[in-house]
Image (spheres, rainbow, N blue to C red):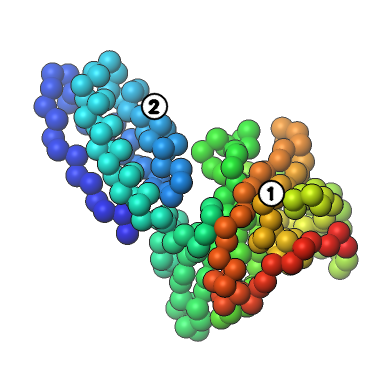
Amino acid sequence: MVPEVVVPEIRAEGTTEYSIQLFTCFRVQYYAGVFEEEILKVSRCLSKAIGSSNVLKAIVFSFLLGASALAFAQHGAMSPNQGEQDGVSVGGNWLEFDSTDKMTGANKVRFELQSNNYFREDNDYRPRVNLYCNNGKLKLADFNPGMRLLPPNRPGFWGQPQLEVEVRVDDTHYFKGWNWMRGHFLSMDKGTVRGLMSAQVFNIALPTRSGRQIAEFSPAGLDFDRVRKACDLTPKKPSKD
């Protein structure tokens, strides 16, 4: 868990009206590897709240820097899901989140890989790949672009709605129809998942409301043994079929 950081009371002329805004701005996403980016976001928010008081900016920014550095040292991230433990690094840019099914007692593991870039629709949310595993087996792998998807543009083998995307795994690229899940996610095929596990470059291109966009990932460094135990998955060179 990220340690709670208490900002001491700052008494300066003209600061009373900013107190609520300061603590509103103090919602920092403690995420390994991107804490500098989050500090910049908070800094911009603080600039609006504090105005031209450079002394206050320096003091509060110092506390934010220290808190973010501590969080970075933990190599993890706070989970956004109730009942799920905070994430731990499992190599490279990958995070593992563990939980237990409250009804069945099944061990549930989620592996998450966030992209290196943002889509135009939301510059605060990175597209991401999630692997959901229950009791040692892969249950679902999905791609979440962080925005509302366009309607399906092709049917699957069983007539299920799909959106066609272009995938690049290192020097291999191909087109795939991924199942369209409620307009927010795309269900990925197992072959692509196994391919990205050992890839250096992994990109997904898809049509969006603002044109064709590409989510760029750096998946290298994943602990294969952790994924094998949790999901019964091993890396394999991707197939275009």
Reply above or below: 193 against 217.
Answer: below
Q: Where is residue 10 in the image (x, y as percent from the top left)?
A: 14, 30
Local crowd size for mark 2, using a 10 Å CA cut-off: few (<14), some (14–19), many (≥20):
few
Which image quarter: residue 198?
Answer: bottom right
Contact, CB < 8 Å: mark 1 with mark 2?
no
Amino acid marked by disc 1: Val
Q: Name the residue under label 1.
A: 201
Q: Quadrant of the C terminus?
A: bottom right
Amino acid marked by disc 2: Arg
| Mark nearer the N terminus (1 vs 2) | 2
User: With 226 as the anchor, is 154 left or right in this view?
Assistant: right
Residue located at (31% from left, 54% from top): 2
Q: Name the residue under label 2.
A: 44
Residue located at (45% from left, 56% from top): 80
Reply above or below: 68 against 55.
Answer: below
Residue located at (55% from left, 35% from top): 123
